[in-house]
Image: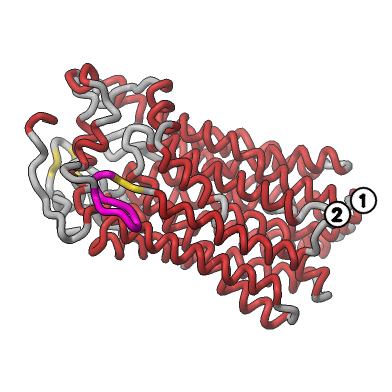
Amino acid sequence: MENVPAFSATEESGRKKFALPVDSEHKATEFRLFSVAAPHMRAFHLSWISFFACFVSTFAAPPLLPIIRDDLDLTATEIGNAGIAAVSGAVFARVAMGSACDLFGPRLASAALTLLTAPAVYCSSIASGPSTFLIVRFFTGFSLATFVSTQFWMSSLFSAPVVGTANGVAGGWGNLGGGATQLIMPLGFELILKMGSDKFTAWRIAFFIPGLFQMLCAYGIFFLGQDLPDGNYAQLHKSGDKHKDKFSKVLYHAVTNYRGWILALTYGYCFGVELAIDNIIAQYFYDRFNVSLHTAGIIAASFGLANFFSRPGGGMLSDIVARRYGMRGRLWALWSVQTLGGVFCIILGKVGTLGVSVAVMLIFSVFVQAACGLTFGVVPFVSRRSLGIISGMTGAGGNVGAVITQVIFFRGSRYTTEKGIMLMGVMIIACTSVITLIHFPQWGGMFTKPSKGKTEEDYYLSEWTEAEKEKGYHKASLKFSENSRHEGGRRVGITESPDTHK
Protein backbone atom coordinates (compact mmCIF):
# COMPACT_ATOMS: atom_id res chain seq x y z
CA MET A 1 0.00 0.00 0.00
CA GLU A 2 2.93 2.28 0.61
CA ASN A 3 3.78 2.07 -3.09
CA VAL A 4 0.64 3.88 -4.23
CA PRO A 5 0.78 7.67 -4.08
CA ALA A 6 -2.28 9.05 -2.34
CA PHE A 7 -3.81 12.43 -1.70
CA SER A 8 -4.89 13.00 1.89
CA ALA A 9 -8.53 12.94 2.85
CA THR A 10 -8.58 16.72 3.17
CA GLU A 11 -6.33 17.54 0.21
CA GLU A 12 -7.92 18.97 -2.89
CA SER A 13 -7.26 16.94 -6.03
CA GLY A 14 -7.94 19.24 -8.93
CA ARG A 15 -11.22 20.83 -7.90
CA LYS A 16 -12.68 17.93 -5.91
CA LYS A 17 -12.29 16.94 -2.30
CA PHE A 18 -12.87 13.42 -1.03
CA ALA A 19 -13.59 12.06 2.42
CA LEU A 20 -11.13 9.18 1.83
CA PRO A 21 -7.49 9.32 0.69
CA VAL A 22 -7.30 8.78 -3.07
CA ASP A 23 -4.71 7.91 -5.73
CA SER A 24 -4.04 9.66 -9.03
CA GLU A 25 -7.26 8.20 -10.50
CA HIS A 26 -9.18 9.50 -7.45
CA LYS A 27 -9.80 5.91 -6.37
CA ALA A 28 -9.90 5.41 -2.59
CA THR A 29 -6.71 3.97 -1.12
CA GLU A 30 -8.48 3.06 2.13
CA PHE A 31 -11.60 0.99 2.77
CA ARG A 32 -13.65 2.35 5.68
CA LEU A 33 -16.47 -0.09 6.23
CA PHE A 34 -18.57 2.06 8.53
CA SER A 35 -18.39 5.20 6.40
CA VAL A 36 -21.16 6.27 4.02
CA ALA A 37 -19.13 9.08 2.47
CA ALA A 38 -19.86 9.90 -1.15
CA PRO A 39 -18.90 8.76 -3.65
CA HIS A 40 -16.77 5.76 -2.65
CA MET A 41 -18.41 4.28 0.43
CA ARG A 42 -21.93 5.34 -0.50
CA ALA A 43 -21.62 3.40 -3.76
CA PHE A 44 -20.22 0.44 -1.81
CA HIS A 45 -23.25 0.23 0.45
CA LEU A 46 -25.75 0.83 -2.36
CA SER A 47 -24.17 -1.90 -4.49
CA TRP A 48 -24.01 -4.66 -1.89
CA ILE A 49 -27.54 -3.98 -0.58
CA SER A 50 -28.95 -4.07 -4.12
CA PHE A 51 -27.11 -7.29 -4.95
CA PHE A 52 -28.33 -8.72 -1.64
CA ALA A 53 -31.93 -7.93 -2.66
CA CYS A 54 -31.47 -9.63 -6.04
CA PHE A 55 -30.06 -12.72 -4.35
CA VAL A 56 -33.03 -12.84 -1.97
CA SER A 57 -35.40 -12.67 -4.95
CA THR A 58 -33.62 -15.28 -7.07
CA PHE A 59 -33.49 -17.84 -4.26
CA ALA A 60 -36.81 -17.01 -2.62
CA ALA A 61 -38.37 -20.20 -3.98
CA PRO A 62 -36.03 -22.98 -2.69
CA PRO A 63 -36.82 -22.58 1.05
CA LEU A 64 -40.54 -22.88 0.25
CA LEU A 65 -40.17 -25.72 -2.27
CA PRO A 66 -41.80 -28.40 -0.10
CA ILE A 67 -44.97 -26.25 -0.11
CA ILE A 68 -44.68 -25.04 -3.71
CA ARG A 69 -43.98 -28.61 -4.83
CA ASP A 70 -47.26 -29.85 -3.37
CA ASP A 71 -49.27 -26.90 -4.69
CA LEU A 72 -47.98 -27.08 -8.27
CA ASP A 73 -47.47 -30.87 -8.36
CA LEU A 74 -43.80 -30.52 -9.30
CA THR A 75 -41.63 -33.57 -9.96
CA ALA A 76 -37.95 -33.80 -8.99
CA THR A 77 -36.98 -33.18 -12.62
CA GLU A 78 -39.22 -30.11 -12.88
CA ILE A 79 -37.75 -28.70 -9.66
CA GLY A 80 -34.26 -29.31 -11.04
CA ASN A 81 -35.16 -27.62 -14.33
CA ALA A 82 -36.47 -24.56 -12.48
CA GLY A 83 -33.26 -24.40 -10.47
CA ILE A 84 -31.25 -24.54 -13.68
CA ALA A 85 -33.41 -21.80 -15.19
CA ALA A 86 -32.82 -19.53 -12.20
CA VAL A 87 -29.07 -19.48 -12.73
CA SER A 88 -28.90 -19.92 -16.52
CA GLY A 89 -30.75 -16.68 -17.25
CA ALA A 90 -27.91 -14.66 -15.80
CA VAL A 91 -25.26 -16.23 -18.05
CA PHE A 92 -25.90 -13.88 -20.97
CA ALA A 93 -27.22 -11.14 -18.71
CA ARG A 94 -23.85 -10.95 -16.95
CA VAL A 95 -21.91 -10.56 -20.18
CA ALA A 96 -24.40 -7.92 -21.31
CA MET A 97 -24.10 -6.20 -17.93
CA GLY A 98 -20.33 -6.03 -18.32
CA SER A 99 -20.74 -4.31 -21.68
CA ALA A 100 -23.32 -1.93 -20.23
CA CYS A 101 -20.96 -0.99 -17.40
CA ASP A 102 -18.12 -0.29 -19.84
CA LEU A 103 -20.31 1.89 -22.04
CA PHE A 104 -22.93 3.49 -19.75
CA GLY A 105 -21.59 3.09 -16.22
CA PRO A 106 -22.46 0.77 -13.31
CA ARG A 107 -25.05 3.05 -11.69
CA LEU A 108 -27.44 3.15 -14.65
CA ALA A 109 -26.80 -0.48 -15.61
CA SER A 110 -27.44 -1.79 -12.11
CA ALA A 111 -30.52 0.34 -11.42
CA ALA A 112 -32.09 -0.58 -14.77
CA LEU A 113 -31.66 -4.34 -14.41
CA THR A 114 -32.78 -4.38 -10.77
CA LEU A 115 -35.96 -2.51 -11.65
CA LEU A 116 -36.70 -4.46 -14.85
CA THR A 117 -36.50 -7.86 -13.12
CA ALA A 118 -38.71 -6.91 -10.15
CA PRO A 119 -41.98 -7.72 -12.04
CA ALA A 120 -40.77 -11.31 -12.49
CA VAL A 121 -40.53 -11.62 -8.70
CA TYR A 122 -44.11 -10.42 -8.28
CA CYS A 123 -45.27 -12.80 -11.02
CA SER A 124 -43.96 -15.75 -8.99
CA SER A 125 -47.13 -15.38 -6.94
CA ILE A 126 -49.31 -16.32 -9.93
CA ALA A 127 -47.35 -19.38 -11.09
CA SER A 128 -49.86 -22.09 -11.90
CA GLY A 129 -47.73 -25.03 -12.99
CA PRO A 130 -44.26 -26.29 -13.86
CA SER A 131 -43.91 -24.12 -16.98
CA THR A 132 -44.87 -20.80 -15.41
CA PHE A 133 -42.80 -21.58 -12.32
CA LEU A 134 -39.76 -22.21 -14.52
CA ILE A 135 -40.36 -19.00 -16.53
CA VAL A 136 -40.57 -16.71 -13.48
CA ARG A 137 -37.44 -18.26 -11.96
CA PHE A 138 -35.63 -17.82 -15.28
CA PHE A 139 -36.40 -14.10 -15.56
CA THR A 140 -35.87 -13.44 -11.86
CA GLY A 141 -32.40 -14.98 -12.22
CA PHE A 142 -31.41 -12.22 -14.64
CA SER A 143 -31.10 -9.97 -11.60
CA LEU A 144 -27.98 -11.87 -10.49
CA ALA A 145 -26.13 -10.00 -13.23
CA THR A 146 -26.04 -7.05 -10.81
CA PHE A 147 -23.04 -8.87 -9.36
CA VAL A 148 -21.04 -7.67 -12.37
CA SER A 149 -22.00 -4.04 -11.83
CA THR A 150 -21.14 -4.42 -8.14
CA GLN A 151 -17.62 -5.69 -8.87
CA PHE A 152 -17.09 -3.22 -11.71
CA TRP A 153 -18.23 -0.35 -9.51
CA MET A 154 -15.88 -1.30 -6.67
CA SER A 155 -12.97 -1.72 -9.10
CA SER A 156 -13.72 1.76 -10.47
CA LEU A 157 -13.78 3.41 -7.04
CA PHE A 158 -11.09 1.61 -5.00
CA SER A 159 -7.34 1.52 -5.63
CA ALA A 160 -5.24 -1.61 -6.21
CA PRO A 161 -4.13 -2.19 -2.58
CA VAL A 162 -7.75 -2.40 -1.32
CA VAL A 163 -9.70 -3.44 -4.42
CA GLY A 164 -9.72 -7.11 -3.37
CA THR A 165 -11.19 -6.16 0.00
CA ALA A 166 -13.81 -3.85 -1.54
CA ASN A 167 -14.84 -6.46 -4.11
CA GLY A 168 -14.85 -9.24 -1.53
CA VAL A 169 -16.98 -7.44 1.03
CA ALA A 170 -19.45 -6.08 -1.55
CA GLY A 171 -19.81 -9.46 -3.26
CA GLY A 172 -19.86 -11.42 -0.01
CA TRP A 173 -22.42 -9.28 1.72
CA GLY A 174 -24.53 -9.32 -1.43
CA ASN A 175 -24.29 -13.10 -1.52
CA LEU A 176 -25.63 -13.13 2.03
CA GLY A 177 -29.01 -12.80 0.36
CA GLY A 178 -28.74 -16.47 -0.64
CA GLY A 179 -28.62 -17.40 3.04
CA ALA A 180 -30.90 -14.68 4.36
CA THR A 181 -33.70 -15.70 2.01
CA GLN A 182 -33.66 -19.13 3.66
CA LEU A 183 -34.80 -17.31 6.81
CA ILE A 184 -36.79 -14.43 5.32
CA MET A 185 -39.14 -16.48 3.15
CA PRO A 186 -40.11 -19.14 5.74
CA LEU A 187 -40.59 -16.37 8.32
CA GLY A 188 -42.76 -14.34 5.97
CA PHE A 189 -44.69 -17.50 5.08
CA GLU A 190 -45.32 -18.30 8.75
CA LEU A 191 -46.48 -14.76 9.52
CA ILE A 192 -48.90 -14.80 6.59
CA LEU A 193 -50.23 -18.17 7.76
CA LYS A 194 -50.88 -16.70 11.22
CA MET A 195 -52.83 -13.87 9.60
CA GLY A 196 -55.35 -16.43 8.35
CA SER A 197 -54.14 -17.51 4.92
CA ASP A 198 -53.92 -21.14 3.90
CA LYS A 199 -50.46 -22.46 3.02
CA PHE A 200 -51.04 -22.50 -0.74
CA THR A 201 -51.98 -18.80 -0.66
CA ALA A 202 -49.36 -17.77 1.91
CA TRP A 203 -46.36 -18.78 -0.21
CA ARG A 204 -47.67 -16.66 -3.08
CA ILE A 205 -48.15 -13.55 -0.95
CA ALA A 206 -44.66 -14.01 0.52
CA PHE A 207 -43.08 -13.22 -2.87
CA PHE A 208 -44.19 -9.59 -2.56
CA ILE A 209 -41.54 -9.14 0.15
CA PRO A 210 -38.47 -9.59 -2.12
CA GLY A 211 -40.19 -7.84 -5.02
CA LEU A 212 -40.73 -4.62 -3.06
CA PHE A 213 -37.23 -4.76 -1.57
CA GLN A 214 -35.70 -5.06 -5.02
CA MET A 215 -37.65 -2.07 -6.40
CA LEU A 216 -36.59 0.19 -3.54
CA CYS A 217 -32.93 -0.73 -4.11
CA ALA A 218 -33.17 0.16 -7.80
CA TYR A 219 -34.40 3.67 -7.02
CA GLY A 220 -31.75 4.08 -4.33
CA ILE A 221 -28.92 3.31 -6.76
CA PHE A 222 -30.29 5.57 -9.47
CA PHE A 223 -30.82 8.64 -7.31
CA LEU A 224 -27.99 8.27 -4.76
CA GLY A 225 -25.16 6.51 -6.59
CA GLN A 226 -22.26 7.87 -8.68
CA ASP A 227 -20.35 5.94 -11.35
CA LEU A 228 -16.83 7.28 -10.81
CA PRO A 229 -15.09 9.45 -8.22
CA ASP A 230 -15.33 12.44 -10.59
CA GLY A 231 -18.96 11.99 -11.65
CA ASN A 232 -21.35 9.90 -13.75
CA TYR A 233 -20.50 8.56 -17.19
CA ALA A 234 -23.01 10.80 -19.01
CA GLN A 235 -21.67 14.04 -17.59
CA LEU A 236 -18.03 12.97 -18.03
CA HIS A 237 -18.66 12.02 -21.67
CA LYS A 238 -20.40 15.36 -22.22
CA SER A 239 -17.56 17.35 -20.64
CA GLY A 240 -14.90 15.38 -22.51
CA ASP A 241 -13.24 14.18 -19.31
CA LYS A 242 -13.92 10.55 -20.26
CA HIS A 243 -13.49 8.96 -23.66
CA LYS A 244 -16.65 7.24 -24.94
CA ASP A 245 -15.26 3.89 -26.02
CA LYS A 246 -16.39 1.72 -28.92
CA PHE A 247 -18.08 -1.55 -28.02
CA SER A 248 -16.25 -3.49 -30.73
CA LYS A 249 -12.83 -2.56 -29.33
CA VAL A 250 -13.84 -3.16 -25.73
CA LEU A 251 -15.20 -6.58 -26.69
CA TYR A 252 -12.11 -7.46 -28.74
CA HIS A 253 -9.66 -6.80 -25.93
CA ALA A 254 -11.81 -8.84 -23.55
CA VAL A 255 -12.34 -11.98 -25.63
CA THR A 256 -8.72 -12.12 -26.80
CA ASN A 257 -7.35 -12.08 -23.24
CA TYR A 258 -7.07 -15.74 -22.25
CA ARG A 259 -6.78 -14.86 -18.54
CA GLY A 260 -10.43 -13.81 -18.55
CA TRP A 261 -11.50 -17.19 -19.92
CA ILE A 262 -9.51 -19.09 -17.30
CA LEU A 263 -11.01 -17.05 -14.48
CA ALA A 264 -14.48 -17.62 -15.96
CA LEU A 265 -13.87 -21.39 -15.79
CA THR A 266 -12.51 -21.40 -12.25
CA TYR A 267 -15.26 -19.05 -11.03
CA GLY A 268 -17.75 -21.61 -12.31
CA TYR A 269 -16.46 -23.94 -9.62
CA CYS A 270 -16.54 -21.57 -6.66
CA PHE A 271 -19.47 -19.22 -7.22
CA GLY A 272 -21.19 -21.70 -9.53
CA VAL A 273 -20.97 -24.34 -6.81
CA GLU A 274 -22.39 -21.85 -4.32
CA LEU A 275 -25.42 -21.26 -6.58
CA ALA A 276 -25.94 -24.99 -7.00
CA ILE A 277 -25.81 -25.52 -3.24
CA ASP A 278 -28.29 -22.66 -2.69
CA ASN A 279 -30.72 -24.51 -4.96
CA ILE A 280 -30.48 -27.95 -3.35
CA ILE A 281 -29.25 -27.70 0.23
CA ALA A 282 -32.53 -27.04 2.08
CA GLN A 283 -34.34 -29.85 0.29
CA TYR A 284 -31.29 -32.13 0.80
CA PHE A 285 -31.37 -31.82 4.58
CA TYR A 286 -35.19 -31.93 4.65
CA ASP A 287 -35.35 -35.16 2.66
CA ARG A 288 -32.20 -36.99 3.83
CA PHE A 289 -32.25 -36.24 7.56
CA ASN A 290 -36.02 -35.78 8.04
CA VAL A 291 -35.68 -32.37 9.70
CA SER A 292 -38.51 -29.83 9.70
CA LEU A 293 -38.84 -27.19 7.00
CA HIS A 294 -37.81 -24.52 9.52
CA THR A 295 -34.71 -26.48 10.60
CA ALA A 296 -33.72 -27.21 6.99
CA GLY A 297 -34.04 -23.48 6.29
CA ILE A 298 -31.75 -22.57 9.20
CA ILE A 299 -29.11 -25.10 8.09
CA ALA A 300 -29.30 -23.90 4.50
CA ALA A 301 -29.14 -20.28 5.65
CA SER A 302 -25.92 -20.94 7.54
CA PHE A 303 -24.24 -21.88 4.25
CA GLY A 304 -25.09 -18.58 2.60
CA LEU A 305 -24.66 -16.47 5.73
CA ALA A 306 -21.02 -17.52 5.95
CA ASN A 307 -20.57 -14.96 3.17
CA PHE A 308 -20.64 -12.33 5.89
CA PHE A 309 -16.98 -13.06 6.55
CA SER A 310 -15.77 -15.76 4.12
CA ARG A 311 -15.91 -13.96 0.78
CA PRO A 312 -14.69 -10.66 2.30
CA GLY A 313 -11.96 -12.72 3.98
CA GLY A 314 -10.93 -14.03 0.56
CA GLY A 315 -10.69 -10.50 -0.82
CA MET A 316 -8.68 -9.34 2.18
CA LEU A 317 -6.37 -12.36 1.91
CA SER A 318 -5.76 -11.50 -1.73
CA ASP A 319 -4.72 -7.94 -0.80
CA ILE A 320 -2.57 -9.12 2.12
CA VAL A 321 -0.53 -11.66 0.13
CA ALA A 322 -0.19 -9.15 -2.71
CA ARG A 323 1.62 -6.71 -0.41
CA ARG A 324 4.53 -9.10 -0.20
CA TYR A 325 4.21 -11.46 -3.16
CA GLY A 326 2.22 -9.38 -5.65
CA MET A 327 0.06 -11.00 -8.31
CA ARG A 328 1.83 -14.34 -7.93
CA GLY A 329 0.69 -14.39 -4.30
CA ARG A 330 -2.89 -13.67 -5.34
CA LEU A 331 -2.84 -16.61 -7.77
CA TRP A 332 -1.30 -19.04 -5.26
CA ALA A 333 -3.86 -18.06 -2.61
CA LEU A 334 -6.75 -18.53 -5.05
CA TRP A 335 -5.57 -21.98 -6.17
CA SER A 336 -4.91 -23.19 -2.61
CA VAL A 337 -8.21 -22.06 -1.11
CA GLN A 338 -10.40 -23.25 -3.98
CA THR A 339 -8.69 -26.66 -4.09
CA LEU A 340 -9.32 -27.11 -0.35
CA GLY A 341 -12.95 -26.19 -1.02
CA GLY A 342 -13.12 -29.11 -3.44
CA VAL A 343 -11.67 -31.46 -0.81
CA PHE A 344 -14.30 -30.49 1.76
CA CYS A 345 -17.05 -30.79 -0.86
CA ILE A 346 -16.03 -34.43 -1.42
CA ILE A 347 -16.11 -35.04 2.34
CA LEU A 348 -19.59 -33.45 2.59
CA GLY A 349 -20.91 -35.94 0.07
CA LYS A 350 -19.49 -38.87 2.03
CA VAL A 351 -20.56 -38.13 5.63
CA GLY A 352 -23.91 -39.54 6.69
CA THR A 353 -24.84 -38.03 10.05
CA LEU A 354 -26.64 -34.72 10.54
CA GLY A 355 -24.18 -33.08 12.94
CA VAL A 356 -21.08 -33.95 10.94
CA SER A 357 -22.76 -32.95 7.67
CA VAL A 358 -23.61 -29.51 9.04
CA ALA A 359 -20.06 -29.02 10.37
CA VAL A 360 -18.42 -30.07 7.09
CA MET A 361 -20.88 -27.94 5.11
CA LEU A 362 -19.87 -24.87 7.12
CA ILE A 363 -16.13 -25.50 6.55
CA PHE A 364 -16.79 -26.11 2.86
CA SER A 365 -18.78 -22.87 2.62
CA VAL A 366 -15.91 -20.82 4.05
CA PHE A 367 -13.41 -22.11 1.48
CA VAL A 368 -15.64 -21.98 -1.59
CA GLN A 369 -16.87 -18.48 -0.78
CA ALA A 370 -13.37 -17.21 0.08
CA ALA A 371 -12.29 -18.45 -3.36
CA CYS A 372 -14.93 -16.15 -4.89
CA GLY A 373 -13.39 -13.19 -3.09
CA LEU A 374 -9.90 -14.24 -4.15
CA THR A 375 -11.01 -14.47 -7.79
CA PHE A 376 -12.07 -10.84 -7.84
CA GLY A 377 -8.79 -9.88 -6.27
CA VAL A 378 -7.28 -10.90 -9.63
CA VAL A 379 -9.99 -9.82 -12.11
CA PRO A 380 -9.43 -6.02 -11.88
CA PHE A 381 -5.86 -6.47 -13.17
CA VAL A 382 -6.68 -8.56 -16.25
CA SER A 383 -7.71 -5.56 -18.36
CA ARG A 384 -8.13 -1.86 -17.74
CA ARG A 385 -9.96 -1.00 -20.95
CA SER A 386 -12.32 -4.00 -20.92
CA LEU A 387 -12.83 -4.37 -17.17
CA GLY A 388 -16.63 -4.57 -17.48
CA ILE A 389 -16.70 -7.39 -20.02
CA ILE A 390 -13.93 -9.30 -18.22
CA SER A 391 -15.99 -9.00 -15.01
CA GLY A 392 -19.07 -10.09 -16.94
CA MET A 393 -17.30 -13.08 -18.50
CA THR A 394 -16.04 -14.18 -15.09
CA GLY A 395 -19.42 -13.70 -13.47
CA ALA A 396 -21.16 -15.53 -16.32
CA GLY A 397 -18.71 -18.37 -15.84
CA GLY A 398 -20.10 -18.75 -12.34
CA ASN A 399 -23.59 -19.21 -13.71
CA VAL A 400 -22.42 -21.58 -16.45
CA GLY A 401 -20.70 -23.69 -13.80
CA ALA A 402 -23.90 -23.74 -11.76
CA VAL A 403 -25.96 -24.83 -14.77
CA ILE A 404 -23.52 -27.58 -15.76
CA THR A 405 -23.29 -28.82 -12.18
CA GLN A 406 -27.06 -28.78 -11.76
CA VAL A 407 -27.65 -30.61 -15.05
CA ILE A 408 -25.03 -33.29 -14.47
CA PHE A 409 -25.43 -34.00 -10.76
CA PHE A 410 -28.76 -32.68 -9.46
CA ARG A 411 -31.29 -33.09 -12.25
CA GLY A 412 -33.57 -36.09 -12.11
CA SER A 413 -32.53 -39.31 -10.38
CA ARG A 414 -29.27 -40.24 -12.11
CA TYR A 415 -27.31 -39.58 -8.89
CA THR A 416 -28.38 -39.31 -5.30
CA THR A 417 -27.84 -35.79 -3.96
CA GLU A 418 -24.98 -36.91 -1.71
CA LYS A 419 -23.25 -38.63 -4.66
CA GLY A 420 -23.70 -35.51 -6.75
CA ILE A 421 -22.11 -33.36 -4.03
CA MET A 422 -19.09 -35.67 -3.85
CA LEU A 423 -18.56 -35.65 -7.64
CA MET A 424 -18.96 -31.88 -7.65
CA GLY A 425 -15.96 -31.70 -5.30
CA VAL A 426 -13.86 -33.69 -7.75
CA MET A 427 -14.86 -31.27 -10.50
CA ILE A 428 -13.84 -28.28 -8.35
CA ILE A 429 -10.31 -29.65 -7.88
CA ALA A 430 -9.90 -30.48 -11.57
CA CYS A 431 -11.12 -27.13 -12.90
CA THR A 432 -9.12 -25.11 -10.36
CA SER A 433 -5.85 -26.55 -11.68
CA VAL A 434 -5.96 -24.28 -14.77
CA ILE A 435 -5.04 -21.28 -12.59
CA THR A 436 -1.45 -22.49 -13.01
CA LEU A 437 -1.65 -21.38 -16.67
CA ILE A 438 -2.22 -17.68 -15.90
CA HIS A 439 0.84 -15.55 -16.60
CA PHE A 440 1.14 -11.76 -16.55
CA PRO A 441 4.21 -10.65 -18.55
CA GLN A 442 4.98 -7.88 -16.08
CA TRP A 443 4.44 -9.97 -12.91
CA GLY A 444 4.69 -13.67 -13.78
CA GLY A 445 2.47 -16.57 -12.72
CA MET A 446 2.34 -19.31 -10.10
CA PHE A 447 5.38 -21.13 -11.51
CA THR A 448 6.75 -18.53 -13.92
CA LYS A 449 8.75 -15.35 -13.46
CA PRO A 450 7.99 -12.00 -15.15
CA SER A 451 8.98 -11.69 -18.78
CA LYS A 452 12.27 -9.82 -19.07
CA GLY A 453 11.89 -6.08 -19.61
CA LYS A 454 8.08 -6.06 -19.52
CA THR A 455 6.34 -3.31 -17.53
CA GLU A 456 2.82 -2.46 -16.41
CA GLU A 457 2.70 0.23 -19.10
CA ASP A 458 3.58 -2.31 -21.79
CA TYR A 459 0.70 -4.53 -20.71
CA TYR A 460 -2.12 -2.02 -20.21
CA LEU A 461 -1.20 0.40 -23.00
CA SER A 462 -1.11 -2.46 -25.51
CA GLU A 463 -4.92 -2.19 -25.50
CA TRP A 464 -4.67 1.20 -27.25
CA THR A 465 -3.53 2.00 -30.78
CA GLU A 466 -0.97 4.71 -31.46
CA ALA A 467 -3.72 6.90 -32.93
CA GLU A 468 -5.76 6.54 -29.74
CA LYS A 469 -2.71 7.37 -27.64
CA GLU A 470 -2.13 10.53 -29.64
CA LYS A 471 -5.67 11.62 -28.73
CA GLY A 472 -4.99 10.91 -25.05
CA TYR A 473 -7.51 8.08 -24.68
CA HIS A 474 -4.93 5.95 -22.88
CA LYS A 475 -4.33 8.28 -19.93
CA ALA A 476 -6.58 6.38 -17.51
CA SER A 477 -4.71 3.16 -18.36
CA LEU A 478 -1.41 4.92 -17.78
CA LYS A 479 -2.51 6.03 -14.31
CA PHE A 480 -3.75 2.53 -13.58
CA SER A 481 -0.37 1.11 -14.61
CA GLU A 482 1.38 3.40 -12.15
CA ASN A 483 -1.01 2.51 -9.33
CA SER A 484 -0.65 -1.24 -10.03
CA ARG A 485 3.16 -1.30 -9.82
CA HIS A 486 3.14 -3.02 -6.41
CA GLU A 487 1.61 -6.17 -7.98
CA GLY A 488 5.18 -7.17 -8.83
CA GLY A 489 5.78 -7.87 -5.13
CA ARG A 490 8.11 -6.15 -2.68
CA ARG A 491 11.12 -6.55 -4.93
CA VAL A 492 9.54 -4.04 -7.32
CA GLY A 493 9.80 -0.38 -6.46
CA ILE A 494 8.02 2.59 -7.91
CA THR A 495 9.72 4.05 -10.92
CA GLU A 496 8.68 6.79 -13.26
CA SER A 497 6.72 5.79 -16.33
CA PRO A 498 8.75 5.72 -19.52
CA ASP A 499 8.63 9.08 -21.27
CA THR A 500 7.48 7.42 -24.46
CA HIS A 501 4.11 6.66 -22.84
CA LYS A 502 3.43 10.21 -21.64
How is the protein colored in the picture? secondary structure
Q: Position of residue 133 (x, y in %)?
A: 81, 43
Q: Position of residue 360 (x, y in %)?
A: 62, 76
Q: Quadrant of the N terminus?
A: bottom left
Secondary structure that dominates the magenta span: loop
Question: Does residue 144 sit above or below 52 in this rendering?
Answer: above
Mark 1 = which residue?
A: 73
Question: Does residue 114 sit above or below 473 in this rendering?
Answer: below
Residue 409 left/right relative to 397: right
Give the residues in magenta. Answer: 441-450
Graded by Cα atoms within 10 Å as few (under 14), some (14 to 19) or many (20 or more), the crowding at tag 1 reads few
Q: Is residue 300 magenta?
A: no
Name the element at disc 1. Answer: loop
Residue occupying the point 60% across, 41% down = 143
Mark 2 = which residue?
A: 76
Q: Position of residue 495 (x, y in %)?
A: 9, 47
Q: Quadrant of the rendered structure where residue 500 is?
A: top left
